[in-house]
Amino acid sequence: MNVINWFELFVSDFERARRFYEQALATSLEIMEGMGGRMALFPYSPDSGVGGCLSDSPEQQPGAGGTRVYLNAEGQLDAILNRVRASGGQIIQNRTAIGEHGFIAVIKDSEGNLVGLHSMT
């Protein structure tokens, strides 16, 4: 069982945030209407039990200081970091070895959220 099964990154400009993640991660996000507004779903496998989205909700605000989510960047950490600035984000912490647990980095997305990236390689 996974401890996390869903996460939402709150955004203030839905289209800007969607473009940021699609460009930085080099993937497409599925757009759908959620309970509180639009959502852009990150790719996931229903078998993994973990999924997440960008959430355009008037009740929530993006920004640093809250919960940090780490996205799977397996085998792509350096490539993603190379695309972050061009996508409208900022690198807060470059690739950092964390011993037997691989590597992490932290970025600031286009909405001001601090998001972690993790890769074993």
Image (cartoon, rainbow, N blue to C red):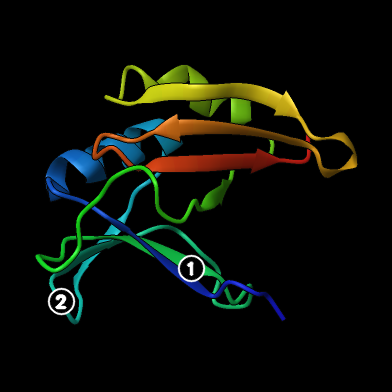
Residue under label 2:
36
Q: Secondary structure at mark 2?
A: loop
Q: Amino acid at mark 2?
A: Gly
- Dividing the image into 4 quarters, which one contains the N terminus? bottom right
In the shown orientation, is residue 80 left or right of residue 110?
right
Residue that protrudes farthest toward the right in the picture: 100
Number of marks: 2
Decide: is 47 above or below 38.
below
In the shown orientation, is residue 25 left or right of residue 46?
left
- Which residue is found at the position 47% from the left and 72% from the top? 6
Decide: is 96 above or below 17.
above
- List x then y, in percent, for residue 81: 51, 23
Q: Which of 68/74 is in front?
A: 68
- Which residue is found at the position 48% from the left and 17% from the top? 82
Residue under label 1:
51
Marks 2 and 1, the one that precedes in the sequence: 2
Q: Amino acid at mark 1?
A: Gly
- List x then y, in percent, for residue 73: 60, 41
Q: Which of 77/70 is in front?
A: 70
Q: Residues within 10 Å of mark 1 (few under 14, many from 20)?
A: some
Q: Secondary structure at mark 1?
A: strand
- Dividing the image into 4 quarters, which one contains the C terminus? top right
Q: Which of 94/19 is in front?
A: 94
Asked whether residue 76 is in view, the answer is: no
Asked whether residue 1 is in view, the answer is: yes
In the shown orientation, is residue 99 left or right of residue 120?
right
In the shown orientation, is residue 87 left or right of residue 75?
left
User: Foreground mark, 2 or 1?
Assistant: 2
- Which residue is found at the position 49% from the left and 51% from the top? 68
Q: CA distance from mark 2 to mark 1?
A: 17 Å
- List x then y, in percent, for residue 108: 38, 32
